[in-house]
Image (cartoon, grey):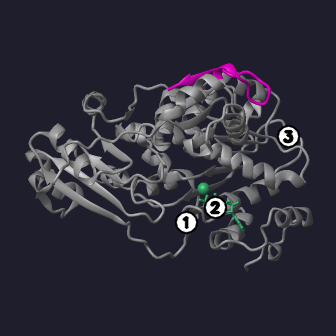
Amino acid sequence: MTYFKELSLPQELLENLSSLGFEQMTPIQQASLPSILEQKDIIAKAKTGSGKTLAFSLPLILNLKAKQQNPQALIIAPTRELCEQIAGELKRLARYKSDVKVITLYGGTSLTAQVASLEKGADILVGTPGRLLDHFSRETIELKAIKTLVLDEADRMLDMGFSEDILKIVSNLPKQRQSLLFSATYPENISTLSAKVLKNPVTIKLQEEEQPLAIEERAYKVENKDKALLSTLQSFQPDLALVFCNTKVKTNEVADMLHEKGFDVAILSGDLEQYERQEMLLQFSNGSLPVLVATDVASRGLDIDGIDIVINYDFPQKPETYTHRIGRTGRADAKGLAVSLCNDYEVRKIEEIRGSLNVEEITTLRPNKNFVIQGEVSTLSIDGGKKKKLRAGDILGTLCKDIGIDPKDIGKINVLETHSYVAINKNVIKKAFNGLKNGKIKKRKFRVWWL
Ligand code: ADP
Ligand code: MG
């Protein structure tokens, strides 16, 4: 079966699918939909972008009963972005049914607002483990009518340490239910999770050629790590560099050191508030602060293109961490470089963490001592985003037409829920800042910060 219309689906649903441009099933949909529609539990592995969301969303919407008091389906996903993405897909698919209510529940936004919308009733809950558990322990969600449970990106949730939270939530679900687990990879601990959550699951694994990561890995034996880090940056001269440390304290020290040497540095550690984290990441990805020093905890789920080099200032303590870290570079078919700076102790640990990795002398590098990495742009933050119906085009228009900034001096514009960020060439940023501060966007006044 390759077409949706070959499945026995209601005509309205098929029409909606085709209006969304979905006629032919993707391989994971072909492999999983028949079993899911038969109410079987499944565990499915398929790579990112293969259409897993629709595979679980479609049967779930099909099974919804109208006008129920309590939520009927629960989807657990690792991040707020993913929750929003899934909710969006669910709503599009459910267009043909009247009144399907989907609520997203994740941290970093007000609990009270979420409680208020929960009180109005919901059919489908999409949330992150932590926030769902919060609601559950406050008794602000009712799980007794859940018929379908979905764990999306289970590997990432395990990676982020959500295993216990997930199990706590699942232990409070009705035993009679369908459970679906989706994952891009199968780390070892996934079988423990699936054994506790799924009942006689059908296992679906899509055959796919393993693409070797285009990452060159190097390790250097070093005595002074600060000097070695500078040498590394000054030899490879990346545009965008990510430096990992094992502790928050080290992260701060290394960032300070680079900053003193004239590098434009962002920092990401568990100490930061959600909004600070977001602003750091934005400034890194838009090139305002092109060196990011981070701990592992803070960098979970980091998905930024164009990172030329990942540097292990501290060597990671587990193989998964090593793989996770170096996987931040070499994305989207670009070649990446991973460099580990190892003291004597760490050199001895390499074997255990990474198998054979040739250790070179740091003195083989040829650094240019005058080289620093600085952003050509800086970032302005505007206190309006999607919620205020602001679009990138509105900001661009104001900057170019009203303030007279040349479009070539304007970099990435990111419009988030409540704030927007725009990268502007440092040469004209003062003009842009004053223009936005004193002027209007879409005839409205906004507050502006120069980050
Ligand atoms: P995954 O979760 O496997 O990483 P997604 O579910 O996010 O992937 O799907 C990736 C993209 O493919 C989405 O934009 C989705 O709308 C689209 N897509 C899903 N199924 C189909 C289909 N049958 N035909 C065309 N596009 C599809
Ligand atoms: Mg997905």
Q: Is residue 316 visible?
A: no
Given residues 343 and 162, the one toward you in this image is 343
Dividing the picture into quarters, in which one does residue 298 lie?
A: top left
Residue 46 numbered mark, or none: 1
Identify which amino acid the numbered label 1 is placed on. Answer: Ala
Disc 2 vs disc 3: Cβ atoms closer than 8 Å? no
Whole-percent x, y for residue 378 in the image: 49, 34
Q: Which residue is mark 3?
A: 68
* Helix, strand or loop for disc 3: loop
Q: Is residue 439 magenta?
A: yes
Which badge, 2 or 3, comes first in the chain's sequence?
A: 2
Q: Is mark 1 within 8 Å of ligand 1?
A: yes
Given residues 223 and 45, the one toward you in this image is 223
For ligand 2, give the image quadrant. Answer: bottom right
Q: Is mark 2 within 8 Å of ligand 1?
A: yes
Identify which amino acid the numbered label 3 is placed on. Answer: Gln
**Residue drawn at 76 percent across, 59 percent down:** 58
Q: Which residue is mark 2?
A: 52
Q: How far separated are the C-alphas under marks 2 and 3?
A: 27 Å
Q: Identify the magenta region.
A: 437-451
**Residue drawn at 69 percent across, 32 percent down:** 385
Give the overall secondary structure of the magenta segment: loop
